Amino acid sequence: MNLNSIVTEADETGPILIIPYMWIGDFVRGHTVVRVLKERWPNRPVDILTTSLCAPLLDYMPGVRAGIVWNLPRSRLALLQQWRLAALLRERRYQTCLIMPRTWKSAIAPALAGIPERVGFVGEFRFGLVNRWRWGEKALPRLIDKKAALALPDGAPRPSEWPVPQLRVPPEEVERWRQANGVGTGPAVALAPGSVGSGKRWPYYGEAARLLTAQGVDVWVVGGPGEKGLANEIVAAGGPKVRDLTGTDLRNGVLALAAAQVAISNDSGLMHVAAALGTPTMGIFGPTSPYHWAPLNGLAATIQTKTHVPCQPCHRPICRMNDHRCMRDIPATKVAEIAGRVLAEVGARAAR
């Protein structure tokens, strides 16, 4: 089955709200849901609830009308903020809301707003908050399957392939970013050394940066403020052709990844950003499974150790077994070699 077999409901025009997962990678993958909705309902506007962290991504997502920036706290109910959010949703007259997280809290504001159709999987006793129940979540192998299935008619089979997420940055915006940061126009590799949990962090980015700069390539380190220490270590190891471009604004990372010729990343949100931008991306996987967590867009290279590590994949944020060999046994020389080949292919395509 493909999406073209779904009957297009072109006459409907009521706006749709998506409540996504708010981690950067999951937020990017949520654009697949937008694309499925636009196939099904081409004339219904699609808005997305977002945090201030993820909000810059919406400027580059085709098919999204608007974002609603609302920073609900993670650790408490915040009922007053839920009421205020519900009032805003009511003003926008949403007719359908897709609630991706299974949590009780994620369904409160749509219910208070009286959105007529509130779609979500059974979870956390949300009876009365979600009124269009979906079942069979455990039979869906990946998180993207669970999320995108909510955009299909109830009971519709999964397509063999989902539409891939897209982030489109205007070339003139990339050029302004280059000029503002003084990075020049030479070939560059962006390194994204951060991740949620140290278990997913490859330890040899500094050595890889040194090997890449020895090939005459500029290296940019991208990430949030939590990666500042890693960036300092990589700059110290790689030398003057390595730039620390970490910061507090995700938009800066998006533009850096759009400007780079190649991105090298752990299994992290920025890996999904780079892939959705169309930047050739090398994903380094240790404790997590590429089948479950790699971008739908595909990667220029999926890098895993050849060493047999019996605990892999473990999906744990911190390694407590086998001396982190799933990452430590991936040599920097191999990563730099693959990056060089990818850069050569990118240059050959550009010269055609």
Image: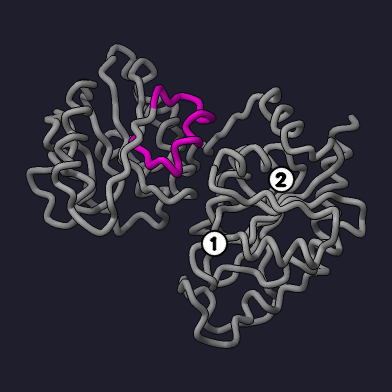
Magenta span main SS: loop
Residue depicted at x 50% and y 30%: 61
**On residue 195, which mark appears?**
1
Residue 294 image offset from top left, x and y in percent: 55, 55
325 or 77, which is in the foreground?
A: 77
Is the residue marked by circle 1 packed among few (<14), some (14-19), or many (20+) residues within 10 Å?
A: many
Q: Which residue is mark 2?
A: 280
Q: Is residue 167 above or below residue 211?
A: above
Residue 138 image offset from top left, x and y in percent: 30, 59
Residue depicted at x 35% and y 35%: 69
Q: Give the extent of the magenta segment.
A: 49-66
Q: Quadrant of residue 184?
A: top right
Q: Is residue 64 above or below residue 284?
A: above
Residue depicted at x 76% and y 52%: 243
Q: Quadrant of residue 237?
A: bottom right
Q: Amino acid at mark 1?
A: Ser
| SS for dot 1 | loop
168 or 143, which is in the foreground?
A: 168
Q: Is residue 34 left or right of residue 222?
A: left
Nearer to us of marks 1 and 2 is 1
Is the residue marked by circle 2 packed among few (<14), some (14-19), or many (20+) residues within 10 Å?
A: many
Q: Amino acid at mark 2?
A: Pro
Q: Is residue 36 left or right of residue 209?
A: left
